Image (cartoon, coloured by chain):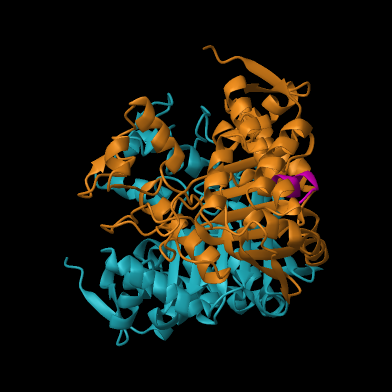
Chain colours: A orange, B cyan
Amino acid sequence: MTDTTELQTEDGLRALVRAILERNGCRPEVAATLAANCVAAERDGSVSHGLFRVDGYVSTLRSGWVDGTAVPVVEDRAPGCIAVDAANGFTQVALAAARPAFVRKVRENGIAMLGIRNSHHLAALWPDVEPFAEEGLIALSMINSMTCSVPVGAKKPVFGTNPLAMAVPAGAEGVLVFDMATTTMANGDVRVARAEGRMLPPGTGVDRDGNPTGDPAAILDGGALVPFGGHKGSLISMMVELLCAGLGGGNFSWEFDWSTHPGAQTPHTGQLFICIDPARGGGLPFGLRAETLIAQMRAAGLDHFPGERRHHTRAQRAEGIPVSSGRMARLRALASGAE
Amino acid sequence: MTDTTELQTEDGLRALVRAILERNGCRPEVAATLAANCVAAERDGSVSHGLFRVDGYVSTLRSGWVDGTAVPVVEDRAPGCIAVDAANGFTQVALAAARPAFVRKVRENGIAMLGIRNSHHLAALWPDVEPFAEEGLIALSMINSMTCSVPVGAKKPVFGTNPLAMAVPAGAEGVLVFDMATTTMANGDVRVARAEGRMLPPGTGVDRDGNPTGDPAAILDGGALVPFGGHKGSLISMMVELLCAGLGGGNFSWEFDWSTHPGAQTPHTGQLFICIDPARGGGLPFGLRAETLIAQMRAAGLDHFPGERRHHTRAQRAEGIPVSSGRMARLRALASGAE
C-alpha cells in the first residue's frame, strides 16, 4: 500500500486535532490551545513536535496523568511577576490564561517573569516564545523535564533535557527564534536514531555503566544523555532546574513518578518565562541592532539563522500543509472514535 | 633570586591597588571600586583576574582608552529597568552607581534589568553577581567583548568570549555562582597555554585558514576561538550579543577600534543584569529548593559545586592572602611611581 500525501488547511487540521483532544477528556479551550500549538509545528515542518505528537497526547490523557479539564489559577505575585498553578494541566493552557496580564506587566515594567508550576508539556518551546517576538518583545523560556541527563562530574542522571528557547524581534529580518535541549540531543531524536539503527556521535550519552557512548540503544537502555558542551552546558542545565523548579515552584526533574500511569508521556514539572520590552533598553531601536548583528554574521559566512528554515517552510505552505494519508486516516479514526 | 611569598591583608592590598589606580588617572571612587574587585579575585584564588590584572588596568588607563574619571549617568527607563551610560568608564563603577536603585526595583517588582553601555570591563563576572545572591537575590549577568570567536557555520569571527554568570542563594549551602566564557576557553587561558608551550584540546579554536586546531599559537596568530558546545553554545553567545549590545545599547564586539590606543586591554561594549527576588516566585522558599537540588546532585556523585573552590580558598585566607614578593615589589613600584 502506498502512502500518498494530502494537502490540508491549517484550520482543518486544527479542528481535527481539537476533536481528538475533546474526545479524550480536554475541555474545549484546552483542546483548542493544544491543537493550535501542534498544527503550527506541523505547518512549520517541525515534524517531531507536530501531528506525530497526537498519539502521545491521547495516551497521556487516557492514562489519567494530566487533567484535560484543569483550570489554571493565575496569581499576581508582584508588579513584575505572575505565577500560575496549572492544576495538573498543560503549560500552554496556563500560559494562555496568564498571557494578557503578563504582556501588560512587560509593557508597564519593561521586564516581567511568569512561572508556571504543577504543569505538563509535550511540545516544542518555540511556539511559546515566538508570538511574544511577533508583538515586539524579547522572550526567554525554559522548562525542566524528566531525569535523563548526567551532570558533568556526576555518575547518575539528575537533569532533564531542560530546553531553553529565545525569540527576538529582528526588524526587517523578521523574528529570530532558537529552541534547544540543553542535553547533547533531545530524547525523541535518540529514539529515532535507535529505530533507524543509526549510531550517534561518540559521547552523546553514557551507557548503564556510565561509559561515554554513541549507541542510542545503550543510552536508552539504562544509560542516559549528558548535557551539551561539557561542564558549561551542565551549568546551563542546572540553571534551568533552579529557575523552573526552584524559582517557579515546579517539580525538579526527578520529583514525579509516572510509573503508575502507563502511557503518560509528559513530565510534570515547571516552566519559566522572562519577557522584556526592548524599547526600555538603553540603545538604538532593538530591531535595527538585531539586523546589524545578522548582517555581520552573514558577512562572516553564516547562511542560515535560527528559525529561518521553519519560517521558510511556513511561507511555502500558504496553500496547504502536506500530510500523509496514513497519518490522516489515523487522525480521523481518533476523532471519530473508530480506532 | 628566589621569589618568596608574603601574607597580605585584604585592606592592605586594596589600599595599594587603589593608590596605583589613582596615580594612573582614576578618581578615588573608581579606584576603590576596581581595587575591591581585583583584590576579591586574588583573595579567592581566582589568580587570572586578581593582582595579575593591575598592569592591564595601568596600561589601559595610560593609553587613554578608558576614562578613569568618568561619572556614569543613571537613567530610570521603566519601573523594572535601569540603563546606565558609563561615559567610557568601567562597568563596575556604573554598577555601583545604579545598584541601590536597581536592588529597590528588584525588590519592588520581583524582577528588574540593568543595562550598562559605553563601558569597559577587565575583570571576572562573578564579583558582579555574587553580592546579589548574598543578599538573597538571583542574579544573571552577561557581557560581550572583543571579536575573537567564529559563530558555528561562519568563516570569520564575530562574537567575543561573551561570558555569562549566575549567582543564586542556596540556603545552608551558601551561594552557588558560575561564571563562564561562552567560548571553549577564555582568551587569557589561551595565552597562558601558549606561554607554557602547552597544546589545547583539538577544536578549541581555528587557525587563520579556519581549520580546527588545538595549537594556542595558531589560535592567537590570525586564528580565533569558537563557541563552546557547537551550535548550541554559538546561539548562547549570540544571545549575549543581542542582550548586551542590542538591548543594553553597548557596542557589538566588532564595533570598536582600540588600535589607536596601544596598551588598551578592555573591550568597549555593554553589560546586562537581570535580577530576581525569589520570594516572588511560585514555590517553596528558594534556598530550600536549591539545597534539595544540590543534595540530589551530590547523591548522584557530584563532589564540587560552582563557586565552592573560591569560597573554600577565601575561608582559608582569613589570616592573610599570600602574594609573591616579586608581585608585591612591582605593585609598590607602581604605587610610588618608582617603576
Residue sitting nearer the eye, A152 or B69: A152
Q: Residue furthest left?
A: B2
Indicate whether A103 appears above or below A226. Answer: below
Name the quadrant containing residue B298. Answer: bottom left
- Residue B321 locus on image (x, y percent): 31, 79
Indicate whether B26 appears above or below A93. Answer: below
Name the quadrant containing residue B277. Answer: bottom right
The answer to whether one can see residue A136 in this image is yes
Bounds of the magenta segment: A130-137
- Residue B206 locus on image (x, y percent): 40, 32
User: In the shown orientation, is residue B253 left or right of residue B314?
Assistant: right
- Residue B107 locus on image (x, y percent): 67, 79
Residue at 56% x, 64% y is B140
- Residue A338 locus on image (x, y percent): 61, 34
Residue sitting nearer the eye, A5 or A92: A5
Q: Residue furthest bottom?
A: B319
User: In the shown orientation, is residue A23 left or right of residue A97?
Assistant: left
